[in-house]
Image: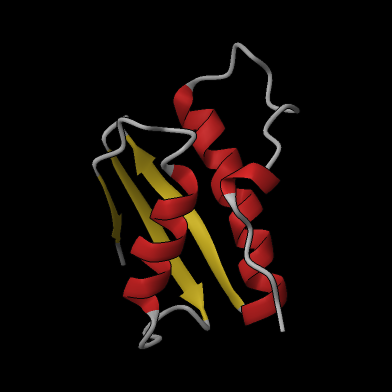
Amino acid sequence: MSTQYTSSQIDLSLVPSEASDQERMKTLIEVLSAYVEHFHGGALEMVSFDGATLQVRMSGACKGCKLEQVTLHGWIEGTVRPFFPDLQEVVAVA
């Protein structure tokens, strides 16, 4: 049985304080991708983030998985929202 990250378990303190929101989000998605790669054989990539909308590319075992929307909205969105409270939506792009 694997454990999912929660926002309280993710430490972004290594990201420089002067980092842009895009750099902070990219780092966060890389942390989540490492988990997905290790436990599920998939991967995540940040395509863009404008402060309100996060676009991610899901690949590997995640691409086309019937739980893609659950992962996208329930887990990714739920994990990043505490760090970016103005986030309005997370969308998967091809």
What is the x, y in percent for residue 84? Answer: 41, 33
What is the x, y in percent for residue 44? Answer: 51, 61
The answer to which quarter of the image holds residue 81 is: top left
**On the rendered image, what quadrant is the C terminus found in?**
bottom left
Residue at x-position 43% and y-position 70%: 71
**On the rendered image, what quadrant is the N terminus found in?**
bottom right
What is the x, y in percent for residue 80? Answer: 47, 45
Q: Residue furthest toward the bottom?
A: 66
What is the x, y in percent for residue 54? Answer: 33, 45
Q: Is residue 70 above or below residue 14?
A: below
Q: Nearer the viewer, residue 90 or 59?
A: 90
Q: Is residue 5 above or below residue 14?
A: below
The answer to which quarter of the image holds residue 58 is: bottom left
Residue at x-position 70% and y-position 77%: 2
Residue at x-position 54% and y-position 30%: 23
Q: Is residue 76 above or below residue 86?
A: below
